[in-house]
Amino acid sequence: PLLILTVIVGLLAGLACYRLLGRPGSPRAILRRALEARQFEPFLQPIVRAGDGHWIGAEVLMRWHLPGEGLIRPDLFIPMAEQTGQILPMTRDLMQQVAEVLAPHAAELPPHCHIGFNISAAHCSDPQLLEDCRNFLAAFPSGSIELWLELTERELIEPTEASDLLFQQLSSLGVKVAIDDFGIGHASLNYLQRFTVDALKIDQSFVKRIGADTLSAHLLDTLVALATKLDIDLVAEGVETAAQRDYLRALRVRYLQGYYFGRPMPIREFMPALRQHRNA
Ligand code: C2E
Ligand code: CA
Ligand code: CA
Ligand code: CA
């Protein structure tokens, strides 16, 4: 069944690619050309402190600005980027773009501004990731940025000596690790310990069901209790209503993210939006 699934996913990615691009070249070559043309752009979505709603930073979400097609959502091209290995240079470029735009405004950012990037399993065996993070942090005055890497629970990596070393080095650099989409995959306690995970991002499906059924309420309570016990920070994403915010706040989830607070925006709009939020 796994093989069939892999084949189907591969075919779907190929089909999406064909439909999206309708031009010649391997997916790898197409993505590389798009990267050279700087068509991958960072969008930023605010992350807020649950207690007072203040922005503490943002998650960086990739968009593909394909001429003639508009903005393409990451679900459609990230799998292709992962399969072809292009995700590594694409993420590097994304980090450079974010540093270029935000570094000149470092003094205006929230203190220890939280900037989160999504990384893929392939990054976890790429020693260059350490260098990319170091370069990103070096672009800002020391201590002004807290760099977070979000690793999805859907594709947990097999820990190896190399990945242990990489995560140790990232940790000495001050880089934090979050497990994304937490609750729908299969991260074990063991896993959380091995990677010295700093935060869990509660999957949106839990937030969506707040108020809808008691089972998910219990699951949410359990996640919070677990995280508290392990001294791991919690971020809830997909917060769309005041009722969800109130519920999560009462549960003492520390950070929130979702359309209720702000949608992902082109990076050029981030500083103006931050100023507006401050003055509101
Ligand atoms: P994710 O990391 O779980 O990111 C959260 C997704 O939820 C984003 O979708 C965001 O726009 C959306 N979202 C945020 N708040 C709300 C809300 O209140 N309601 C609803 N319904 N949705 C909300 P997006 O930007 O389409 O990204 C989809 C996924 O693509 C991400 O899920 C992430 O797994 C992946 N992705 C995005 N950028 C990158 C990247 O640079 N590298 C990698 N490897 N993956 C990325
Ligand atoms: Ca994420
Ligand atoms: Ca997520
Ligand atoms: Ca997700």
Image (tube, helix red, strand yellow):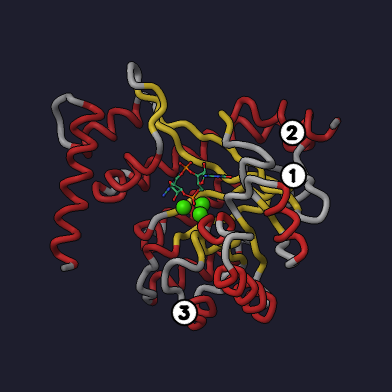
Nearest the viewer among 97 and 245 is 245
Residue 154: quarter of image:
bottom left
Q: Residue at x 66, y 35 (%)?
A: 103
Dot 1 beta carbon under 8 Å from ligand 1: no
Q: Earlier in the sequence, mark 1 or mark 3?
A: 1
**Category of crowding for the residue at label 2, using alpha-carbon neighbours closer than 10 angstroms: few (below 14), some (14–19), many (at least 20):** some
Question: Tag 1, which secondary structure?
Answer: strand
C-alpha gap between disc 1 and disc 2: 8 Å
Question: Tag 2, which secondary structure?
Answer: helix
Q: Earlier in the sequence, mark 1 or mark 2?
A: 1
Q: Position of residue 151 (x, y in %)?
A: 47, 60
**Category of crowding for the residue at label 1, using alpha-carbon neighbours closer than 10 angstroms: few (below 14), some (14–19), many (at least 20):** many
Look at mark 1 in the image and give the residue it sits on: 55
Which disc, if any, is residue 28? none
Amino acid type assigned to the residue bearing label 3 in the image: Ser
**1 and 2 marks in contact (CB < 8 Å):** yes
- Residue that lies at the very extreme toward the top in this rendered image: 68
Q: Quadrant of the N terminus?
A: bottom left
Look at mark 2 in the image and give the residue it sits on: 274
Q: Earlier in the sequence, mark 3 or mark 2?
A: 3
Look at mark 3 in the image and give the residue it sits on: 188
Q: Residue at x 39, y 27 (%)?
A: 39
Q: Position of residue 44 (x, y in %)?
A: 58, 37
Asked if residue 136 is positioned above or below residue 155 in the image, the reply reads above
**3 and 2 marks in contact (CB < 8 Å):** no
Asked if residue 2 is positioned above or below residue 93 in the image, the reply reads below
Q: Position of residue 38 (x, y in %)?
A: 40, 27
Amino acid type assigned to the residue bearing label 2 in the image: Leu
C-alpha gap between disc 1 and disc 3: 31 Å
Q: Quadrant of the C terminus?
A: top right
Question: Tag 3, which secondary structure?
Answer: loop
